[in-house]
Amino acid sequence: MPVYEYQCTECGEIKEAFQKISDAPLTTCSNCKGSLKKLISQSTFHLKGSGWYVTDYGGAKNQNKEDKTKKNNSKAKEPKTTSKKTTVSKD
């Protein structure tokens, strides 16, 4: 349920109200019976994970990830050379 903030135009008191989106906005201050105005406050909603513009279409950051992936894939395809050390014993 969203939290809305209201400020009284008479006494300046700020109140928070838990309301449904469909509920009518509050109009009178419980402290002085003045009129209330709805405040715009910062949201705590964050888009996280893949599939959002910031993570998938970030431009230069995404290009760097693609370059690293290509380098890692090309390294994986190269054959690994191992050098065997042989020892010759003198008898």
Image: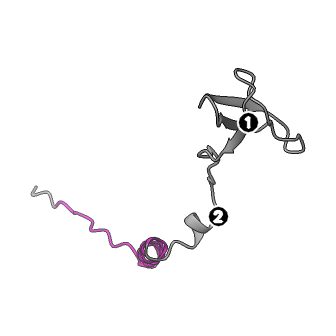
Asked if 49 appears above or below 69 in the picture, the reply is: above
Residue depicted at 62% across the width and 50% down the height: 46
Quadrant in the rendering for residue 80: bottom left
| In the rendered image, the vertical position of residue 23 relative to residue 91, given as above or below | above
User: Disc 1 designates what residue?
Assistant: 35
**Which quadrant of the figure has residue 10?**
top right
Under tag 2, what secondary structure?
loop
Placement of 19 over or under 78, stated as above or below: above
Label 1 packing within 10 angstroms: few (<14), some (14-19), many (20+): some
| Percent x, y of residue 7 | 65, 36
* Of the two numbered discs 1 and 2 in the rendering, the one whose residue sits closer to the viewer: 1
Choose between 70 and 49: the one closer to the eye.
49
Rendered residue at 22%/63% (across/down) = 85
Residue that label 2 marks? 52
Residue type at numbered disc 2: Trp
Task: Point out the image quarter for the C terminus.
Answer: bottom left
Residue density around tag 2, few if under 14, some if 14–19, many if 20 or more, within 10 Å: few
Callout 1: SS: loop
Q: Position of residue 83 (x, y in %)?
A: 27, 68
Indicate the quadrant containing the N terminus: top left, top right, bottom left or bottom right. Answer: top right
80 displayed left or right of 31: left
Which residue lies at the image location 44% right of the left edge and 71% below the top edge? 61
Report the magenta residues as a range.
61-87
Q: Nearer the viewer, residue 8 or 66?
A: 8
Q: Is 22 colored magenta in this rendering?
A: no
N-terminal-most mark, 1 or 2: 1
Disc 1 marks a residue whose amino acid type is Ser
Determine the main secondary structure of the stretch shown in magenta.
helix
Mark 1–mark 2 contact, CB under 8 Å?
A: no
Where in the figure is residue 4, as x and y percent of width and height?
Answer: 72, 38
